[in-house]
Image: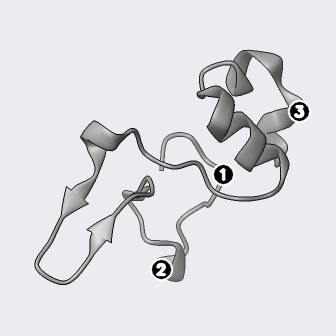
Amino acid sequence: MEVSQYPELIAQFSTGNQTRIKQGLIAKAPLEGWHYGSKEIVKEFHIYHSVAIECGGEIYDIDN
């Protein structure tokens, strides 16, 4: 929900995703970004950190 507090950030999301974020839900990837695997369909954005959180990586550091 923190993103929803900054107009310049929330404006980058679709109207539907803006509503989801303001409700505390995750943003959905656009249909063309969905991954169809053998056992699942991935519809959410996956964020990968250069240093894993469980290894001491910072969660909110834009460089991680």
Name the residue nearer the viewer: 12 or 36: 36
Q: Residues within 10 Å of mark 3 (few under 14, many from 20)?
A: few
Q: Residues within 10 Å of mark 1 (few under 14, many from 20)?
A: few
Helix, strand or loop at label 1? It is loop
In the visual, does 49 lie left or right of 42?
right
Residue 42: x and y, percent?
33, 64
- In three-dimensional space, the C-alpha distance between marks 1 and 2, rounded to whole angstroms, equals 14 Å
Name the residue nearer the viewer: 45 or 38: 38
Above or below, 59 relative to 11 = below
Residue at point 71%, 59% (across, down): 25
Which residue is disc 2 drawn over? 55
Amino acid identity at mark 3: Gln
Q: Label for residue 5?
A: 3
- In three-dimensional space, the C-alpha distance between marks 3 and 1, rounded to whole angstroms, equals 15 Å
Above or below, 45 relative to 63 = below
Amino acid identity at mark 1: Tyr
Amino acid identity at mark 2: Cys
